[in-house]
Image: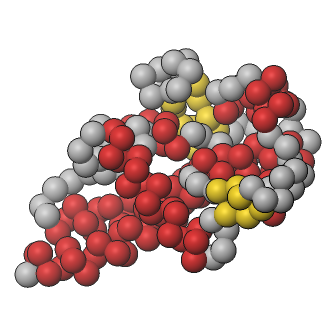
Amino acid sequence: ERDRWAVKARPRFARAQYWFLCILIANTGIRPSEVVKLRHNDLGLFKSPSEDELYTRIMIRREVSKVRKFRDVIASDFHKTYERYLDYCREIRFRFGKEIQPSDYIFPKTGNYNSHIDRLNNLIRPNLIRIGLHKKASKSHPDVDVYYSAYSFRSWYITQRLENGLNIYTLAKNCGTSIKTIASTYDYSENWAF
């Protein structure tokens, strides 16, 4: 009975993972390679003293970061999204008699790191194909296709923040990259289609 339930629940949980992964990257600009290494205890809530609003603090540890530097990423109104995702995780764990521990990975890890990020990319790729966003012709080279992936959500985040006038220094600090990289890599007119 438990195995039968797991077969039914797997697609639902895969959709929940896809949804949460996309929202997490698109609202924080965290690299997919950093997202797959996040644990539940890396996320925390704090209240703004002046505005009385809740914010989510995501701690990117040195060993998780691509650039090997600690940084905090602040996301507004993200805790409700995280709680919804946790409900899916708790349901799966409950069926197998396990509880979610603070040190558990947000995206349950199977095998080594490379297979884990491949699995998350495989969650995103079919959905991008389904909605017609997997590839498009490049503006500068019409005969070259541009492929979108999980990393495209990070590009979209940076693009949106630049378009909305966020200070490039703050954006670079939040994304764990340099001002030079943002200025040279992220063309915000190119990413609007995505």
**Residue 58 in which image quadrant:** top right
Quadrant (top left, top right, bottom left, bottom right) of the N terminus: bottom left
In percent of width and height, residue 112 lies at: 27, 39
Q: Residue at x 17, y 69 (%)?
A: 95
Residue at left offset 59%, top offset 29%? 72
Front in this rendered view, residue 99 or 109: 109
Image-based side of 32 in relation to 85, left or right:
right
Q: Position of residue 181 (x, y in %)?
A: 76, 27
Asked if residue 27 can be seen in this view, the reply is no
**In the image, is residue 122 above or below residue 110?**
below
User: Taking the image as drawn, is residue 5 in sight?
Assistant: yes
**Front in this rendered view, residue 76 or 157:** 157
Relative placement, left or right, of 163 versus 68 is right
User: In the rendered view, does 135 fall on the left or right side of 12?
Assistant: right
Give the residue displayed 86% in from the left and 38% down from the top. 166
Tell which residue pokes out farthest to the left in this image: 1
Horizontal relation, residue 46 to residue 132: left or right: left
